[in-house]
Amino acid sequence: MDPSSTIQEPFDLIRLSLSERVFVKLRGDRELVGVLHAYDGHMNLILSNVEETVMIVDSVDGSYEGHGTVKVAKRKMDMLFVRGDGVILVSPPSRT
């Protein structure tokens, strides 16, 4: 087994995902899919070819109990810096 591809710590999984497409879940019902170019210990990320998906919940009476509608807004960006304090999850590409 190649020692450079062993996963012993969470950041090893991120390191192995460099130059790969990753899924990033952010606070505020935002999701990103893009190519990971760099990261640091704070989970600041630099992504390219990014598609951002934002879920917007419009509630009728101010409650979130099934009333209202959910809208999905998408946009594409060539390059994006993601501040680490908003990152909830980073998922590497599936390795089959």
Image (cartoon, helix red, strand yellow):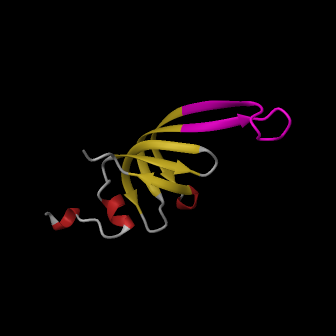
Where the N terminus falls, by quadrant?
bottom left
- Give above or below for 35 relative to 9: above
- Give above or below for 26 relative to 3: above
Observer-nearest of 82 and 89: 89
Q: Residue at x 22, y 62 (%)?
A: 5
70 is within the stretch colored magenta: yes
Start-end of magenta stretch: 53-74
Observer-nearest of 5 and 45: 5
- Give above or below for 23 relative to 14: above
Q: Residue at x 71, y 36 (%)?
A: 57
Observer-nearest of 88 and 51: 88
x then y, percent, for residue 36: 37, 50
x then y, percent, for residue 54: 60, 38
Q: Residue furthest left?
A: 1
Q: Which quadrant of the view contains residue 50?
A: top left
46 sits left or right of 26 in the view: left
x then y, percent, for residue 80: 48, 47
41 is within the stretch colored magenta: no
Q: Residue furthest right?
A: 61
